[in-house]
Image: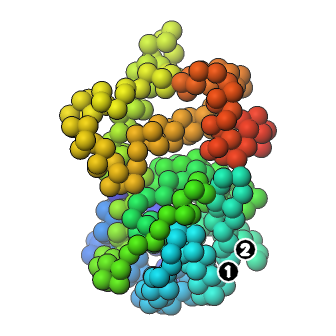
Amino acid sequence: MISAGFVDDALECLARRGIDPGPVLAQAGFAAPVGGVVSAEQYGALWLAMSQALDDEFFGLGGRPMRPGSFTLLCHALMGASTLEQALRRALRFLGIVLDDPMGTLEVAGGTAAIVLRDSGEPRSAFAYRTYWIIVHGITCWLVGRRIPLRQVDFRCGPPGHAADYGLFFGAPVRFYAPVSRLAFDAAFLTLPARRSERALRDFLRAAPANILVRYRHDAGLAARVRAHLRAGMLRQGKQQDGMLREGAANAWPGFADLARQLRLPAATLRRRLAAEGQTYRGIKDELRRFKAEELLRTTLRPVGDIAAELGFSEPSAFHRAFRKWSGQSPGAFRRRSPA
């Protein structure tokens, strides 16, 4: 589902142009006013109706209009790319020509890849940056056939009234008032092969943009079920530790065979279905450890050794090595650079 805040953000784009939202909502199959959350399919229909009303697939939020049909041309421009990195660089060049502003670049350093957006003037809205990233992230996830999990999402602008929805939507730590707008992920994904055919592209375009809003969400599929199961286990373990409500040690997580039994799936089926989503049990555990480590480093003053123990590392040095692999920096450096 898509939160009501994102629907309101979209409708504000009509208001700024003096366009009556009633006919647009009717074309998208909505009754006015819209209340509460909507499905990805409904939001996709609204996006298409607004693109026609605004003559702009980017909601009028770029330096120049993204004329209807640009999204389709962008997808065709990516066909034939051999890797995710090549596809991303093509996508960013294409959007730079079409939109002019913001200008996106791919920056790679210290094991982290980031799509960085720079504006020629004042910061745009969080909704504008989110829309850009939905387009690029959604298309490239489809190209490689799996979700690219995110490490961090930074916004140059201040938080909107529904800022909490952004963290839920992206499934990654979100920061506002950052120096640049930036969507970061593990650089190892850049080598993934782009493997879609022209026939697959036709099917993809028939369902767009609703499919990029739902298919590669962080909270969809079996991997999301495994994450929720592990988080619940951490929370139960934490409540048993002296009555404290903090999450407990990650070393309490079950082994793979035990996890399969708890989820009532044969181990081979669990492994095969996770692989089909481009995931592994080890990778999911590392992702949860990374998110929890970053949260504890940002929001507490607990010693790094204590954090390492809570996350299931046998010694602080192992945690330091893992954290440097995740983020390209030491835990101490991450803590110093994080906003208070």
Question: Which amino acid, by three-letter code, is at mark 2?
Answer: Asp
Q: Is residue 3 above or below residue 14?
A: above
Q: Where is residue 89 in the image (x, y as percent from the top left)?
A: 61, 75
Q: In this view, does 313 lie above or below 211?
A: above
- Residue 1 appears in the figure: yes
Asked whether the residues under the numbered discs 1 and 2 touch, taking CB atoms below 8 Å apart as contact, a structural biologist would say yes
- Res. 86 image quadrant: bottom right
- Residue 235 appears in the figure: no
Total tally of numbered discs in the picture: 2
Q: Which of marks 1 and 2 is nearer the N terminus?
A: 1
Query: Which residue is nearer to you in this view: 153 or 159?
Result: 153
Determine crowd level at label 2: few under 14, some 14-19, many 20+ residues with C-alpha closer than 10 A. Answer: some
Query: Which residue is nearer to you in this view: 314 or 209?
Result: 314
- Res. 339 image quadrant: top right
Q: Where is residue 186 in the image (x, y as percent from the top left)?
A: 58, 54
- The quadrant the C terminus occupies is top right
Q: Where is residue 223 in the image (x, y as percent from the top left)?
A: 36, 46
Q: Position of residue 116 (x, y in %)?
A: 67, 66
Query: Which residue is nearer to you in this view: 133 or 41?
Result: 133
- Res. 197 image quadrant: bottom left
Which numbered disc covers residue 101?
1
Position of residue 273 in the picture relative to residue 194 (left or right): left
- Name the residue: 73% across, 43% down: 329
Position of residue 192 in the picture relative to residue 146 (left or right): right
